[in-house]
Amino acid sequence: MEMEMEKGVKRWLVNISQWNPTPNEFYIAMSVLPQEQHSSVTRFMKTEDQKRALVSRLLQYALVHEVLEIPFEEIIIIRTPEGKPYLESHKNSMKFPNFNFNVSHHGDYVAIASEPICLVGLDIVCCVNPGKETVSEFIHNFSSYFSSSEWEKIVNAGSDDHVLDVFFRNWCLKEAFVKALGTGVGYKLDYVEFQHKDWADIYVKVDGDTLKDWNFWLFELQGRHRVAVARGHPRMASESYKKTLKQTHFDNDLYKLGFHLPNPRFLTRTVEELCALFPLCSYKTSF
């Protein structure tokens, strides 16, 4: 059973800085998606933002198709009121007790992670100062989102680069956690405190209580990017996200199976590979 469940654990990553489509190639790639998804791509003004939005949706449909073997025309992906995407129930999704996925994009990367039993949350950050402020000015805009212990470690990290790195590592973990819950930006992040040993053996405390049924991983990517993955118990999901799940309560053995599944490193995919999965996609004939 463990080997079967492992098939539901996916970690895919696309480096969009390596994809520079012509306007026609971009249109063809978007055309493989359902028509109702197009506006979620074209609503962005900047080309880079459109690329991120498009690749995010390609990853969702391609992963669902590959893992659950659902025909593309039968895949329905919608969002909770808080904006978390989920797969509308399908008979093929019954092969896993609680299949769910999460996506993230920032900087050069767009990624997706899925789990067959546990909740999954994912966040990517590019560890650079995005504004014209000093590093100190920038991070202080977010001081209220960290516990006193976390904040002390951030401001005392050393050089500006080290301060940004520790700041974004903590931020990335917090975002992965709340995205797994499906709570959105309303969650009190200062109540969420991460502890670790050199960024390994990571665990979280919420309002002072350690959550023992959650796992966290933090990876480094090229170009000063970080990606965090959270895996935890479905009973903690937000009320709106619980409605999208098949199960929120599990017997201990089944939950432990999901909790201890291997966490693979991210597999790099290209836009061309994703598009080639879609039937009758003319984009793949150009390569």
Image: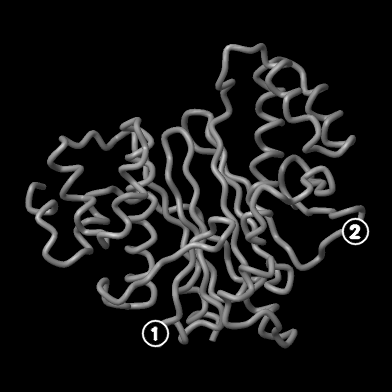
Above or below, 47 against 241 in this view is above
Say what secondary structure mark 1 lies in. Answer: helix
Q: Which residue is drawn at 32% across and 49% down?
A: 39
Q: Residue at x 70, y 71 (%)?
A: 233
Q: Which residue is drawn at 82% across and 62% down?
A: 211
> Residue 189 placed where, x, y %?
77, 45
> Residue 124 placed where, x, y %?
54, 42
Q: Quadrant of the N terminus?
A: bottom right
Picture disc at residue 92: 1
Location of residue 131 (image quadrant): top right
Looking at the picture, tell me which residue is in the foreground, 79 or 286.
79
Q: Which amino acid does label 2 sit on?
A: Asp
Q: Residue at x 58, y 77 (%)?
A: 245
Disc 1: CA contacts within 10 A as few (<14), some (14-19) or many (>=20): few
Picture disc at residue 68: none
Q: Mark 2 points at which residue?
A: 209
Above or below, 179 against 262 in this view is above
